[in-house]
Image (cartoon, rainbow, N blue to C red):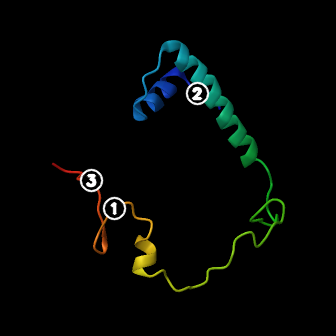
Amino acid sequence: MELSKRDVEHIARLARIRMTPEETEVMRGQLSDILGQFRALAEVDADGAETTAHPTGAAGALRPDARSEGQGREQTLANAPNRHGEFVRVRAVLQ
């Protein structure tokens, strides 16, 4: 599908991107090529093809979720650089 200069200018306006006429022409060619690739993919007959979650068949790469006891307050605050009682003291953000 060949995009027109007007199509590319419209897309750039929607994306709020300023483009020079040269950039518009380059982008017109690139976007037309991308749309052509999607057209080629749309023509592929994928009926009956098995879906895959991973192209190499790898499975179980992540550990299973398991509940565990959390750290205690003191252990959690042990590495806090500046504490005030049971709170972490930080610099003021708002004046």
Does residue 95 lie above or below 55 as drawn? above
Q: Relative to 50, is 74 above or below?
A: below
At 75% from the left and 42% from the top, the residue drawn is 40
**Distance CA(mark 3)–CA(mark 1):** 10 Å
Quadrant, the N terminus: top right
Q: Residues within 10 Å of mark 3 (few under 14, many from 20)?
A: few
Q: Relative to the observer, which residue lies in front, 62 or 34?
A: 62
Distance, label 1 to label 2, CA atoms, is: 59 Å
Q: Which residue is mark 1?
A: 82
Residue furthest to the left? 95
- The kind of secondary structure element at disc 2 is loop
Type of the residue with mark 3: Arg
- Look at the picture and state if 14 lies above or below 27: below
Viewer-nearest residue: 3 or 84: 84
Task: Give the residue displayed 56% in from the left and 85% down from the top.
Answer: 68
Q: Report x, y in % for residue 38.
A: 69, 42
Crowdedness near tag 2: few (<14), some (14–19) or many (≥20) residues, C-alpha within 10 Å: some
Task: Identify the image quadrant of residue 18.
Answer: top left
Q: Marks 3 and 2, Cα distance to the nearest angstrom?
A: 54 Å
List the residue tagged with mark 2: 3
Judged by depth in the image, the label closer to the viewer, 3 or 1, is 1
User: Closer to the N terminus: mark 1 or mark 2?
Assistant: 2
Mark number, residue 91: 3
If you read the primary sequence from the N terminus, does the residue marked by circle 3 or circle 2 appear first? 2
Which sits earlier in the primary sequence, circle 3 or circle 1? Answer: 1
The residue lying at 46 percent from left, 24 percent from top is: 9
Helix, strand or loop status at disc 1: loop
Which residue is drawn at the image coordinates 45% and 65% (left, top)?
79
Q: Amino acid at mark 2?
A: Leu
